[in-house]
Every structure is written in structure tokens, then in C-alpha cells.
Amino acid sequence: MKFRPLHDRVVVKRVSAEEKTAGGIIIPDTAKEKPQEGEVVAVGPGARNEKGELVPLEVKVGDRVLFGKWSGTEVKIDGEELLIMKESDIMGILEDAKAAKKAA
């Protein structure tokens, strides 16, 4: 991907939604709720504070994050559906997901 977000913006790729319920019922595409979890694929350089100094972002490429239901702007880049949001729209980083990814 050849896209670099500006300032404190982050590009996130949603993780795929569950196809089945815990009881084994298959969920049709029309009834699926979009997941609020994703993987960071690009980050901007950071925001500027009151003194004009660059404050780097806490999230980095590869982090698994949770974000609000209505967060971000949906875009399609190179045929891939992505979200562009400010770092402040991200609620947190999933630490277990990072550890599981490294182990695999």
C-alpha cells in the first residue's frame, strides 16, 4: 500500500467477523455487525503539542486495536477496505493479540 496518513491519523484494517455463533448457527452477511477490532497498517508521524513539538503516536504498525463503533472514515485503497481514524478514536491495544501473533 502506498498511503501515508498525516498528523495523528491511523489506517486500520478490520479483522474478519465471526461466521458462526457459539452454538454453531451460521450468520448471513446482511446480519453481521462490523467488528470493532482491527490491525494498524499505517500511522502518521504524530500530532504537534502547544509548543509545536512533534508528539509521536503510541500505536504502531501491526498493533491489534479496539475502536468505537462509528469511528473513522471507510475508504477503499488498492481494492482493500480500510478505516482512517485519529489515534484518539482508538480505545486501546490488545496485548494478547500481539503476543499470540509473535508466537505463531
Image: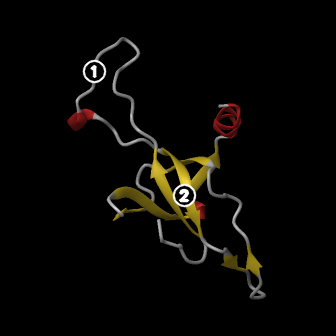
Figure quadrant of the C terminus? top right
Residue 25 figure quarter? top left
At 74% from the left and 74% from the top, the residue drawn is 55
Tell me the tag on residue 26. Answer: 1
Dot 1 falls on a residue whose secondary structure is loop
Residue 20 against residue 6 in the figure, above or below? above
Tell me the tag on residue 41. Answer: 2
Q: Residues within 10 Å of mark 1 (few under 14, many from 20)?
A: few
User: As drawn, is 85 to the left or to the right of 19?
Assistant: right
Residue 56 against residue 41 in the figure, above or below? below
Q: Residue furthest bottom?
A: 52
Answer yes or no: do the residues labelled 1 and 2 have beta carbons within 8 Å? no
For this rendering, which residue is in front, 47 or 62? 62
Which is in the foreground here, disc 1 or disc 2?
Answer: 2
Dot 2 falls on a residue whose secondary structure is strand
- Whichever of labels 1 and 2 marks the residue nearer the N terminus, that label is 1
User: As drawn, is 30 to the left or to the right of 64?
Assistant: left
At 65% from the left and 46% from the top, the residue drawn is 93
Instruction: Look at label 1 and name its amino acid.
Output: Ile
Residue 74 point in image, percent of width and height:
36, 61
User: As drawn, is 93 to the left or to the right of 3?
Assistant: right
At 66% from the left and 76% from the top, the residue drawn is 47
Residue 31 point in image, percent of width and height:
24, 34
For this rendering, which residue is in front, 1 or 97? 1
For this rendering, which residue is in front, 2 or 32? 2
